[in-house]
Image: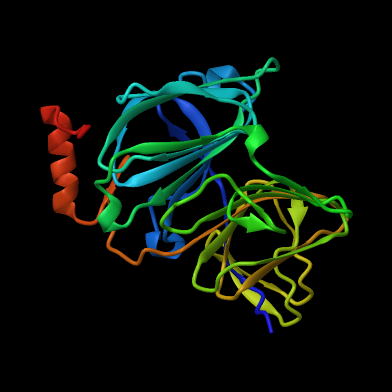
């Protein structure tokens, strides 16, 4: 019998300033790395005032991680030290493996209404892949399967598999699944996730019930314990749900629709030494990376 995952923690995304002055909301990052392993950070960079995001993320380094950018409105122009450049448009995804090191920049631009809408996820790399050659997997909106069900449920499959459709992002060590799920009111969504995987959801439209076990439960919401005997607590916009153990998740909607990112992956279970955009296994490796930046030997290709 399948075990539905209960809620471990709910976190409300917090306003954060990044890059050259980009106002965004951070769902998690720079703390409790063991809880989210293999994921490191999730930023929600939605905005409707160009002056709050257009300065973007000028040239900066990465080593030892993967950055996953998903754009829904507007576009992000990018370039890097390997000579790659292009634009991530609405519905597109860029999965960048920084590996041994890359310098790049990301400059957001709003749509005709001045709106910018997207997310960036950071995933860790295991020790044996931290110094591999940098590379990209870039997919367009048209290349991402969209599963539509009779009840109005829609699921975009960026990576992983849902109802026989497999996403275009392939060959990632942590075996990630990344789904964009939209549920209409009064619907139920059940999806199996390997029990050994970390699983989380980020709500960015509407609200839904993310666990309906008949037993009372407690979970953390911004360091406060909540108790709900009816399982009707709806979790809404800009909320991150970290699930506990189990082999499936169940989401139900009441009078509202809900749209969320469902993300899971195989934990790495390795030490994390992290400073800014560089994530290694030891403090010595971090020191080496920043010394190489100063010496101009950071880029290995």
Counting from the top left corner in percent of width and height, residue 249 is at 67, 67
Q: Looking at the image, is 9 positioned above or below residue 240?
A: below
**In the drawing, does residue 123 fall left or right of residue 236?**
left
Q: Nearer the viewer, residue 52 or 282?
A: 282
Counting from the top left corner in percent of width and height, residue 173 is at 41, 56
Instruction: Please report the residue visible at 29 percent of the width from the left and 52 percent of the height from the top.
Output: 129
Counting from the top left corner in percent of width and height, residue 188 is at 81, 63
Q: Looking at the image, is 6 positioned above or below residue 36?
A: below
Counting from the top left corner in percent of width and height, residue 197 is at 50, 67
**In the drawing, does residue 101 fall left or right of residue 168?**
left
Instruction: Please report the residue visible at 67 percent of the width from the left and 33 percent of the height from the top.
Output: 142
Residue 33 visible within the image: yes
**In which image quadrant can residue 227 be found?**
bottom right
The C terminus lies in quadrant? top left
The N terminus lies in quadrant? bottom right
Q: Nearer the viewer, residue 223 or 205?
A: 205
Q: Nearer the viewer, residue 136 or 248?
A: 136
């Amino acid at each position: 019998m399948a075990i539905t995952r209960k809620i471990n923690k709910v976190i409300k995304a917090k306003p954060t300033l990044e890059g050259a002055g980009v106002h965004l909301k951070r769902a998690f990052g720079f703390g409790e790395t063991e809880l989210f392993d293999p994921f490191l950070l999730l930023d929600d960079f939605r905005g409707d005032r160009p002056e709050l995001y257009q300065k973007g993320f000028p040239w900066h380094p990465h080593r030892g991680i993967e950055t996953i950018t998903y754009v829904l409105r507007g576009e992000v122009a990018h370039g890097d030290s390997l000579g790659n450049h292009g634009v991530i448009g609405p519905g597109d995804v860029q999965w960048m493996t920084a590996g041994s090191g890359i310098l790049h920049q990301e400059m957001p631009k709003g749509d005709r209404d001045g709106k910018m809408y997207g997310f960036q996820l950071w995933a860790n790399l295991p020790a044996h892949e931290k110094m591999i050659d940098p590379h990209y997997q870039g997919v367009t909106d048209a290349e991402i399967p969209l599963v539509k069900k009779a009840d109005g449920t829609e699921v975009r499959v960026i990576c992983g598999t849902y109802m026989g459709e497999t996403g275009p992002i392939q060959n990632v060590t942590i075996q990630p699944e990344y789904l964009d799920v939209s549920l209409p009111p009064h619907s139920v969504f059940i999806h199996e996730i390997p029990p050994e995987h970390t699983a989380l959801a980020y709500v960015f439209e509407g609200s839904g019930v993310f666990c309906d076990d008949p037993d009372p439960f407690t979970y953390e919401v911004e360091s406060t314990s909540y108790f709900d005997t009816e399982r009707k607590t709806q979790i809404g916009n800009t909320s991150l749900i970290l699930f506990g153990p189990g082999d499936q998740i169940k989401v139900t909607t009441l009078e509202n629709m809900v749209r969320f990112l469902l993300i899971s992956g195989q934990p790495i279970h390795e030490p994390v030494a992290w400073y800014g955009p560089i994530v290694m296994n030891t403090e010595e490796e971090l020191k080496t990376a920043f010394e190489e930046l100063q010496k101009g030997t950071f880029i290995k290709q």
